[in-house]
Amino acid sequence: MDLPESATTEPTTRDPTKVTIADVAKAAGVSKGLVSFALNDRPGVSAETRTRILQIAQTLGWTPSLRARSLSSKRSFALGLVIARDPEVLGSDPFFTSFIAGVETILAPEGLALVLSVVPDEPTELHTYRTLVTDGRVDGVFLSDLRRDDARIPCLAELGLPTVTLGRPDQPSPFPSVSIDDTHGITESVRHLVGLGHRRIAHVAGSAAMLHGSRRRDAFTLAMRSAGLGDGQVVETDFSIADGADATRRLLRQSEPPTAIVFASDPMAIAGIGVAQELGVRVPEDVSITGFDDIEFARYVYPALTTVGATPMVWGRAAATTLLGLIRTGSADDVELPAARLIVRGSASTPAPR
């Protein structure tokens, strides 16, 4: 099929928010059906005609309707992230903000959306996944905060929903993973403190129900044993700032408090610095503190936080790229990001003589 001679007039540029396929068809002097075939790269349109229609659509500023794309392709053009955490805890943790920012740097240029759901517990989370699939709201999901024997993995496999796990599960999984070795960063933290002369080192851990919480705790214990210091003292939390502050208060009020504390997250570590100052304990002279994640705020507290850089924005970009590849081709390889490394700043130093 070719354009008629009447379509040689150059179209005028219009408001792109009002441009439709009908406008493109009128400017080109052809039917809406032919324009639709050309724009969707379907057969039945000559190469010359397709090029002409695409040029006219670009000049007019035509952009595809997301709803129309969804109806014609049976895709939602959205990815999902369901998080089972207390909203107040989530709101105080910049990790997910940075992760989502990384995801958006990949989705936005593609004209895709991120559907975020924050739920209170696992049963609600499983129900949410089923609803997302039933309603056709997402083409795939990111699975975060992996748990022991995670019930979400068989659920998502049964639903047939393309999924990328953030970290490697402890069970068989049909899904690709995007992982970072966070144990290396904890090991480096302990070695750094031991090298400074610390012997009484405690760990304020995250929830053992989450794989990254238990993984960091195990890395701490192993590093302490390797240094000949036993298991070290561990206080488990739910990763919240309040729990981190409470754990610090309990540790520092002991008759023989630790001279250094390794925190499983930056928000808890920053809370720990505040509690220490509240109790009249100097950081780092009386107690050294390290964190995990290297959130932006960590470099601006006083003293600046020695922490482990987990690059959540890079993680978000890698996860989004992997999930889009899985959706488009049906397969994707696991991705191993560079190991988290220790960033030395001012919150850790040689312990003061006692």
Image (spheres, helix red, strand yellow):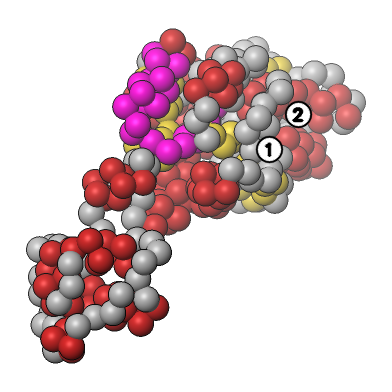
Q: Using the rendered view, name the quadrant where residue 105 is placed.
A: bottom left
Q: How many marks?
A: 2
Quadrant including the N terminus = bottom left
Q: Name the residue type under label 2.
A: Ala
Q: Nearer the viewer, residue 78 or 118?
A: 78
Q: Which residues are magenta?
A: 124-145
The residue that label 1 is drawn on is 182
**Horizontal side, residue 307 vs residue 181: left or right:** left
Q: Is residue 126 magenta?
A: yes
Q: Using the rendered view, name the quadrant where residue 241 is placed.
A: top left
- Percent x, y of residue 234: 67, 17
**Horizontal side, residue 137 vs residue 296: left or right:** left
Quadrant including the C terminus = top right
The residue that label 2 is drawn on is 219
Q: Nearer the viewer, residue 52 or 120?
A: 52
| Mark 2 nearby-residue class (10 Å; few <14, some 14–19, many ≥20) | some
Q: Are marks 1 and 2 in contact (CB under 8 Å)?
A: yes
- Percent x, y of residue 174: 66, 30
SS state under label 2 = helix
**Horizontal side, residue 209 vs residue 141: left or right:** right
Q: Nearer the viewer, residue 69 or 161?
A: 69
Is residue 114 in view from this perspective?
Answer: no
Q: Residue at x 46, y 37 (%)?
A: 140
Residue 63, compared with residue 275, is above or below; it is: below
